[in-house]
Image (spheres, grey):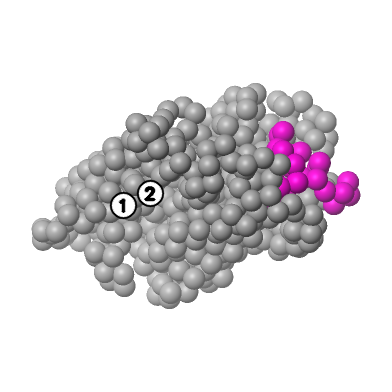
Amino acid sequence: MRTDAPMPPSGARPVDSAFRIEATGTEPVPAGLRHGRPWSVFTLWFGANVQFATLTVGALSTAVFGLTFVQAALAVTLGTLLPSVLIGLLSTRGPGTGVLQLIQARAPFGLLGNLPSALFTVVNGVGWCAVDSTLGVFILRHLLHLAFAPALLVVMAAQIAVALLGYRMIHTVERVLAVLLVAVFAVVSVYGFAHLHAAPAQGPAAGTAGAFVLTVTVTAARCLGWASYASDYSRYLPQHTSPRRVFLAAAGGTALAGVWIGVLGAALGTVGFISDPSSMVSGLLPAALGTVTLVSLLLSTLSSTVIDLYSGAMGALVAGFQVRRWVSVLVVGGLGSVLAWVAGQGDYATSFQNFLLLTGYWLAPWAAVMVTAFWISGRGSAVDTAVLYDRRHRFGRGLPAALLGLAATVPFISQTLYTGPVAAAHPGLGDIGPFVGFAVAALAYTALTARRPAPVRTDPHDPTTSPSTPGVPL
């Protein structure tokens, strides 16, 4: 089963134009195509998190969950910092391996054991594409008074065009938008923080502790949604790029933008209830500033969705779908469009909250396995890339550990779709399912790898195990 695109020539030079379609697929990026500095990782993750979804999650904490501004700010900060560290750690392996995050997951999960993670990444990409596209549609409808369908077509066309071109165009877009969005949100911050109310109109229905935990959980889930993509956007950096600089760039960009925009959303949420996403800005800011902010937020949906489209499409290739990368982008974008249409017809706030929690239930145990494996294998140690493409390494200990974490999550789930027995008996806990799943998966993986077998040896002359061999089957 073919999963990798043909390797570029070993002596190829970096592509200078962002307007050329990326040729690299799921194989390691060769030395001749390596380029860039860690700063590009910072601007990518900063630009990706200065977005409407971040603002909306922050607003939920006060306008819907009923926290005071100070409580919400603390919860948003805590929920952002934890996954930011994970994204930073996972990003450090990109330059050393030159491969996608999902390819790296083959080490603890195995080639076949990694398939659920790859398929979930496709679902995660489709889901986030739908979420951000819906937000963009609300804005476009408000600005131009378009019907939902044509507004959705305009939004999706722009997003798919950028994702089709690939890695270099995505970094270019994120770099430009990072500068623009900082300027706009600096102005919005002056207004938002000056007009915030100390407390919302009504207190939290589930109690302060439950609302606080719920805010931490949904904030962490939003940020954790990037985890399975982390090294996708650092793998083109030169191989000997400092891991410390990559960590600071990825974690710093994610944390700074996530905390700033999330806390700003919490401030805006104290002013009024969110009837739909665009009303959070248009109804609370002066007309001219509101319009400029809505246009900027529309662009911010582009900055986040192109990452979901790109990495979701790569997930399909890692899962074994025998299609070109650009075809995979079109399929993921098409599915996201259909889901955005469905999501746009219902209760946005409830649907968004449920989606965040659902993604967190799997991503938390998965991230626990990846980070635990990172520490067990040695933070600065070189990765044997050949093992990641070795067909004999079918199953690792990562999958059973993640499944144990997922099973441990179920009793603590608390949302409108399902409430577990522990959450039902103790509603003041909030939804702590992802945190329980993370802890159990980390402990399980540590226990399962206590007696580590000898590493899989690969023969560089064996075409079935060589990392440079295209079309390594799963």
- Circles 1 and 2: CB atoms closer than 8 Å: yes
Q: Which residue is under mark 1?
A: 439
* Three-letter residue code for mark 2: Phe
CA distance separating discs 1 and 2: 6 Å
- Taking the spot 64% from the left edge, 46% from the top edge, the residue there is 62
Image location of residue 463, percent across then percent down: 21, 52
- Taking the spot 55% from the left edge, 62% from the top edge, the residue there is 255
Region in magenta? 267-289
Please say if 418 is above or below 56: above
- Taking the spot 52% from the left edge, 38% from the top edge, the residue there is 206
Label 2 neighbour load within 10 Å: few <14, some 14-19, many 20+: many
Label 1 sits on a secondary structure element that is: helix
* Three-letter residue code for mark 1: Ala
Quadrant location of residue 334? Answer: top right
Image location of residue 129, percent across then percent down: 57, 39
Label 2 sits on a secondary structure element that is: helix
Q: Which residue is under mark 2?
A: 435
Is residue 18 toward the left or the right of residue 462 in the image?
Answer: right
